Image (cartoon, rainbow, N blue to C red):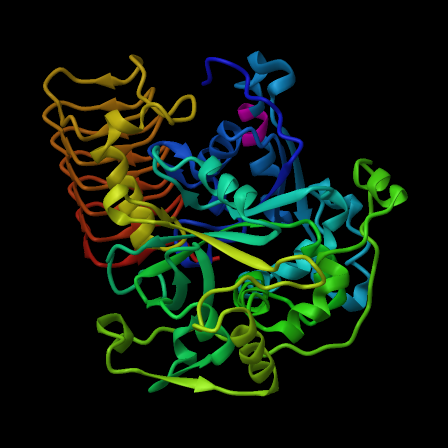
Amino acid sequence: MFSAAPKRSKEFQAVVLAGHGSNLYPLTSKDTLCKALLPIGNEPMISYVLTWLEQAGILDVLILTPAPYHSSLSHHLQSFRQSQTSLGEGAMKIDLRAIESSVLDPNSGGLTGVDGGSSDESDGGEIDDEILKSKTADLLRAYSNYLSTDFILLPCDFIPPPNLPLSALLDAHRTRPNATMTSLFYERAEVGKDGPERILVGWDRQTKSLLHVQEIEDVDDEIELRMSLLWKYPRMTLTTKLLDSHVYVFKHSVLELLTMYPQIESIREELVPWLVKGGYQTRLAQAWKSALNPTPNPLRLSLQHSTSFLPPSISSPSTIPPSGRSTEESLSQSLASLQIQPSHDEDDNEEESTSEEEDGRGGRKEDKVGGGKVGCGVVVWKLEDGFVARANTLPTYFELNRQFVKNLAIQSTMLPPGALPSNSSLIDARAQISTDSLVGASTRVGERTNVKKSVVGRHCVIGRNVKILGCVIMDFVTIGDGVKLENCILSQRCTVEDKSDLRDCEVGGQFTVLAESKVKNEKLANLS
């Protein structure tokens, strides 16, 4: 995959979250296929994430997944490691850990007893997907002893375009003085009513600072912004056109901040907005000074370079404002009707007087906390530079596969091994496969079958006179004679019997569509 072994980075580690994928029903199930192994262009999506990390030299990776998926994910990672055997010392070190329900239950003591998480044996308790999404900060606390450097947190479903290297985000973090967090946002593309939820994002184009992140449901007719923020960033941009990739680069000391404030449960909904506020609220940043800018000592530096390093535990009562998630379509049209209402408090008065002393024009100035700056940077990816999305909903998963076949020639430089078709595809000479389609190895295609704008997996059997248009067909699928498929997703090992007609459907794993069925806009799956 690489002409030379990448240099192992001692600067960053990576944490990959591989959850349930409940928004991808009926494609995902603990009995069929986990989200991390759903294919994009015939290769599991997590392979793109690992390749992205590897190309940036990030070779120490911790993957966290619910216990039911540990076995299947471990099997795939074995294959991924085998593809790296030629890299020698440059091969990626992957630590796969199964998340037990006890880890997210503070009453069970699981937050400190997670060392056995690499086993695929479950403790008998299943973790609900919504609970897992809301407890991401708890996961970082639980597995913080595996992290000894600054780290990248990212989901298994983020699929970057070939011209978006992870090094761009890492360089932005490196060059920002004392950066606490650097995040990646991207311009949204409309992919249907079930697409990603909108958020209100504020950022400064000149300094590339992330200044405001707010859920749409929390926005009424007025937007309250602190005067301390407006003094420092008078030309802040507010928009609902950006989406959070959930890819963050964190300073290692953020883990100590999480220990100080155990009330923080969610990274996206609580920690990120809270860190952003610390960039312009002096009192908040002062409270974090001991955690974010600790005084170094020889013993601590020695422990940080040890593989058995455990971050110190600090307890301090505090409260943080709750937040929720929702969508409000009115904000997608315009922000012009909204009024920005300045918010005053004692902290703002202190900030304003300081600003007047240091910059009488009310311009930008840097935050300082005990001699150390507190900053949250942002990298914004424009849609015109390439399509990017998270494959965490059915519309975006479908669109990512469409983009794959559309740009197959361009993407070939980034594809993991095995994604491109081999000569072993058994395609009848009278079958027609368009150039914007991909057919996997060992797949048999019958005579007079027509495949357009589609991705067909490996080891499939497709009968005669079949018409397939704009579909995603996974591995080991059987399609009978005379079948018509349009804009459908067929999961692994499902069967579509003769003369069936499916349009705009998603078919779950191992499901059988009976002969001569005519189905439109349905989700088909076996009952659990």
Relative placement, left or right, of 50 versus 146 is: left
Q: Position of residue 163 (x, y in %)?
A: 34, 34
The residue shown at (40%, 22%) is: 418
The residue shown at (44%, 58%) is: 527
Q: Position of residue 385 (x, y in %)?
A: 27, 42
Residue 6 in view in this figure: yes
Q: Nearer the viewer, residue 73 or 492?
A: 73
Q: How many marks?
A: 0
Q: Which residues are magenta?
A: 76-80
The residue shown at (38%, 27%) is: 414
Quarter of the figure with residue 425:
top left
Quarter of the figure with residue 72:
top right
Q: Nearer the viewer, residue 462 or 134?
A: 134
Relative placement, left or right, of 462 versus 63 is: left
As drawn, the residue found furthest toward the right would be: 299
Q: Nearer the viewer, residue 489 or 210?
A: 210
